[in-house]
Image: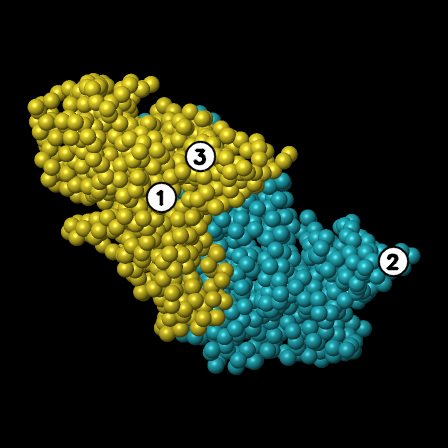
Chain colours: A cyan, B yellow
């Protein structure tokens, strides 16, 4: 069989494949990640690439269906790429670091007591008053220095202990890590290495993976990375991933993709911060239940089969290497415990990080992602639900949708008189598409200016920006002349319907949950909004379209990626670690589909902002 | 290089080796174990084999120095073999089983609560009142059934949990094993396998390895095996082994030899009892500190370097597979904790099994082996010492010495008038040599009949059984005409000197230890004698030669292999397991060589029975 060479731009990566291989497979095999939310079924049209043959002729093709029959070059355009440019990475994280500090100054902080500790010991000078074995001497010294006893040990370290102690003059650094309601000696190193005590906190999202490298002794973030979860090649949401994991080799492949991505991020973090991989001895991961199953190569199939039970919500600490994560081979991986199949460790971490579980006042946490999770409670109780919002607010499944990357329109204003549009683009470049926060302000503007009615239908067509299309009427946000692709950027009635369903799912979830607990929406004193919106979400617009309830604006606070912040809290504090277990036990999962009111509430929310306008007094016109 | 075929008899094992290989190496490579206490240096002469060439001509050769230059057959005679015949195995163990029962009826028994438990659960019928993850459901059911909570789990089992539970209708058997101050779920099996709960207890002696297969649910011994520790090829005592382990590949080789032997014994045990290897989920090993280091592939070098400290006395439970032991791959290995470099877990097990640590009266445990360990104490204190007795009482290093196997003279009577000899041979066959108990009765008889004086010198030579030899005078116990080899079986003055030193080491150790603690020998109310003597040791003879103190005979009790019995107690009782830890902490090691009185006492004991005859009133003549 013939073999052909394919070069991917702008990565400049070359791969040789057998004739007939799809471009998508070739890309995966050389580490180029192309967006492919429909799992390569050829239906979503998101994996468009420019194929340039030997004569220099280009043609637009779908990477998932085009097969290779000659040498050629493939240009992967920005909107088809599963990568973020460095500028965005930094921008995204500056705000998170700032926010981390503000959480720390809340007065509800945790005791600094990292999950892994390094203790330097001079065993020669230790006067034990009796002759002890090497191991007893070591444990005795550790207990004296740390107050921790008894200690768990493992054969691996014991085997090398005799030589190690004598070769370094009985001066060693011991790393302890929390395990089995105690501490395990996971590492014994020669000489004083106690200053080099590093760990990682990660949030493994369905779409995005965020990670931070932390100096555990100082409690300081040394570096941050964000990357797409390259599992997205095989589907945009957890359900598609679960289905794919049931195919032959699927679970293995999804597991490998996430661990490869994490390892690449770790590599960049340690290189960027000049830290040795061996000095990383703990990693805390939060993520939804499906992501954690895939990370650990646990079959997630039962999550989507009645009665929708995961194999495990709480996973005991394990060697990171068991999950294929490259830190010190003896280092431990901790997964923040989840509550149920659709309320995972990311929500536990969010509850921890927001301190919702310590609030005296009734509080609400809304995590808007592919799943919209809602947690309601205070120091006395917490109940949580999840709604299938779909990926619309992440820019997926919409005609010109994209994630909050360079080139995304993130904010839009419409003049009511002539429907003229002004917008801002992330990175100040020519627009490629519209991200979630852009859609929210767009919908809000279209409502205010009367382009659409409460049902989302386009009512006025007498404007150059309005025209008919295959998907009903559409509104032109940006004309081809001003965009990066040269094509118009539009929102169709089908897109509006899609967004309306997503916002209805989130709003009706919180609404039913609050009512189920016999509260009124007005009773909520604090609303924590977490998710990929970052700092660009306009609350007023979000309330205007009926995504968020119409409450005093000062009750809202953005907490950014609370799943990542919670993982970091756990990494840095044994107390926080223990409290996640308490939170996970304390939270009651409420299944919305079991509640007869949910469908009614959802139907009522399929309007902008809602059928019941009395709930949105700010916009009663 | 030419290759030759060698056939070993009576094993009928064939191996092809390159020209120049020694017979000993060839034997090792095909699993034939030849006695070689001098580590193959060609000095001990214990590895004599009969080499029969293609013409049928035979010649006696040393296996360690004879090299192979043609095809031939090797007959390994009984006295050179590192194996016991089945008859002896059974005989040795019948007595131990009987003894086990008597210990159990002592009123000081342990609660039956094995280290690994199997619990059958029907999870479908479990009404938890809420939706739980598979793992939580399992743990909840285990806790309800066993009262144990929280439970440790591992990723290995979690990964298969979802499929397993659903494929077997939620009916599973969970195996719990004691670990880290709690219990770990080590195994989850489909359906009800709770009846098949088996474990192993082993004593890993320097010379002999004993093992038993136990039904953990019933607390019954199903089978017993005894085998030579094939490490003996590389030296008879722990010091030689430690030295060998320092050679390149030495530690690896010694580790492999002991694990291969244990695995072979396990294989025979499970086949004999029709038990599946997978149903073995725990093994408890006792052994001296060096043996445990070698079993776990921990470098024992520091045991013989001042200040004589082992790497570890107490080893946490570990997967048996980490030590190369073939039971269920998730099964755990427990090592009975030791006290010091020369007072190991075998003595802890002996103290446990004898219940010395529960005695109100002052008691003494003497374990006579290659090392002679002595423990003195009661419920309030225990102090222990070790003396380098040497392997004489195991029949090693003596002209006609052999272990207590078929063909060994185990008891001897001498007529004082004509020095005529009557003796009994193990297995009622022609005599091959003399074992430890045989030497004790022989020395006692030679003393009574005046053949030797108090110093061990032969005083009377006017008898056909007495003659001069290269090693001074010798006494002929059996003439060649009546022996298996056709050669005379003798004891030389050098042998007597050797035995005298061994008994002096043991006696002076117990004597100094008792004096060091400000007691008198008469204060000892119970004397437990453990070791390879088995049931054939005559106490009166042992006192006569000054090996044991001259106390009322009813204070003595034989407890056989107390290290094995203690390991079995631990296997069957979590309480006994915990008590071994207490014992190991409670026992104070007393180093004899630090005591100025030891050398004096040793010199004084270099007489039969002793220079101070007032200590042996029974034999004041």
Determine the CA span between mark 1 and mark 3: 17 Å
Determine the CA span between mark 2 and mark 3: 80 Å
Mark 1 chain: B
Q: Are marks 2 and 3 on the same chain?
A: no
Q: Residue at x 60, y 59 (%)?
A: A252
Q: Nearer the viewer, residue A355 or B318?
A: B318
Q: Is residue A10 left or right of residue A287?
A: right
Q: Is residue B117 left or right of residue A209?
A: left
Residue tagged 3: B49
Residue tagged 2: A53
Q: Position of residue B470 (x, y in %)?
A: 33, 18
Q: Nearer the viewer, residue B211 or A493?
A: B211
Determine the CA span between mark 2 and mark 1: 79 Å
At mark 3, the secondary structure is strand
> Can residue B362 be seen at all in this image of the molecule?
yes
- Label 3, residues with CA under 10 Å away: few <14, some 14-19, many ≥20: many
At mark 2, the secondary structure is loop
Q: Residue at x 12, y 34 (%)?
A: B524
Mark 3 chain: B
What label does residue B84 carry, if any?
1
Within the image, what quadrant is residue A270 found in?
Answer: top right
- Label 1, residues with CA under 10 Å away: few <14, some 14-19, many ≥20: some
């Amino acid at each position: 069989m013939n073999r052909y060479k394919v070069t991917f731009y702008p990565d400049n990566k070359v791969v040789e494949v057998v004739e007939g291989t799809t471009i998508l497979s070739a890309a995966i095999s050389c580490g180029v990640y192309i967006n492919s939310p429909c799992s390569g079924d050829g239906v979503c049209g998101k994996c468009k690439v420019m194929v340039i043959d030997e004569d220099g002729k280009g043609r637009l093709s779908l990477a998932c269906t085009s097969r290779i029959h000659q040498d050629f070059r493939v240009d992967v355009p920005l909107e088809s790429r599963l990568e973020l440019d460095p500028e965005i990475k930094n921008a995204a994280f500056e705000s998170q670091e700032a926010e981390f500090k503000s959480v720390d100054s809340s007065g509800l902080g945790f005791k600094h007591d990292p999950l892994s500790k390094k203790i330097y010991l001079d065993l020669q000078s230790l006067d034990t008053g009796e002759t002890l074995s090497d191991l007893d001497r070591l444990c005795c010294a550790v207990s004296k220095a740390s107050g921790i006893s008894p200690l768990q040990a493992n054969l691996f370290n014991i085997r090398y202990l005799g030589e190690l102690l004598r070769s370094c003059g009985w001066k060693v650094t011991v790393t302890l890590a929390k395990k089995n309601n105690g501490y395990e000696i996971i590492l014994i190193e020669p000489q004083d290495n106690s200053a080099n005590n590093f760990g990682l906190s990660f949030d493994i999202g369905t779409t995005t993976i965020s990670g931070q490298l932390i100096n555990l002794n100082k409690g300081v973030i040394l570096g941050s990375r964000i990357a797409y979860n390259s599992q997205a090649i095989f589907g945009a949401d957890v359900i598609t991933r679960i289905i794919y994991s049931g195919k032959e080799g699927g679970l293995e492949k999804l597991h490998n993709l996430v661990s490869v991505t994490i390892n690449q991020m770790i590599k960049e973090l340690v290189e960027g911060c000049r830290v040795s991989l061996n000095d990383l001895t703990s990693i805390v991961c939060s993520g939804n239940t499906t992501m954690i199953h895939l990370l650990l190569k646990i079959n997630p199939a039962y999550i989507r089969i009645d009665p929708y039970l995961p194999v495990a919500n709480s996973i005991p600490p394990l060697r990171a290497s068991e999950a294929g994560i490259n830190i010190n081979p003896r280092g431990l991986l901790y997964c923040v415990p989840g509550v149920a199949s659709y309320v995972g460790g990311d929500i536990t971490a969010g509850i921890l990080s927001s301190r919702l579980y310590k609030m005296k006042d009734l509080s609400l946490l809304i995590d808007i992602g592919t799943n919209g999770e809602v947690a309601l409670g205070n120091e006395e109780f917490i109940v949580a639900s999840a709604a299938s919002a779909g990926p619309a607010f992440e820019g997926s499944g919409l005609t010109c949708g994209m994630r909050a990357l360079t080139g995304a329109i993130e904010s839009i204003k419409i003049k009511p008189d002539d429907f003229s549009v002004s917008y801002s683009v992330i990175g100040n470049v020519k627009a490629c598409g519209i991200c979630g926060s852009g859609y929210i302000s767009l919908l809000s503007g279209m409502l205010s200016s009367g382009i659409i009615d409460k049902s989302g239908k386009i009512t006025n067509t007498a404007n150059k920006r309005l025209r008919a299309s295959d998907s009903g009427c559409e509104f032109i946000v940006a004309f081809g002349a001003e965009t990066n692709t040269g094509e118009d950027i539009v929102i169709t009635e089908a897109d509006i319907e899609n967004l309306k369903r997503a916002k209805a799912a989130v709003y009706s979830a919180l609404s039913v949950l609050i009512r189920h607990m016999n509260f009124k929406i007005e009773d909520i004193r604090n609303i924590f909004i977490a998710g990929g919106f970052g700092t660009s979400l306009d609350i007023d617009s979000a309330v205007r379209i009926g995504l968020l309830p119409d409450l005093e604006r000062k009750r809202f606070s953005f907490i950014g990626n609370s799943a990542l912040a919670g993982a970091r809290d756990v990494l840095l504090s044994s107390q926080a670690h223990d409290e996640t277990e308490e939170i996970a036990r304390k939270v009651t999962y409420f299944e919305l589909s079991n509640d007869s009111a949910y469908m009614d509430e959802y139907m009522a929310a399929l309007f902008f902002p809602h059928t019941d306008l009395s709930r949105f007094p700010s916009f009663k016109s």
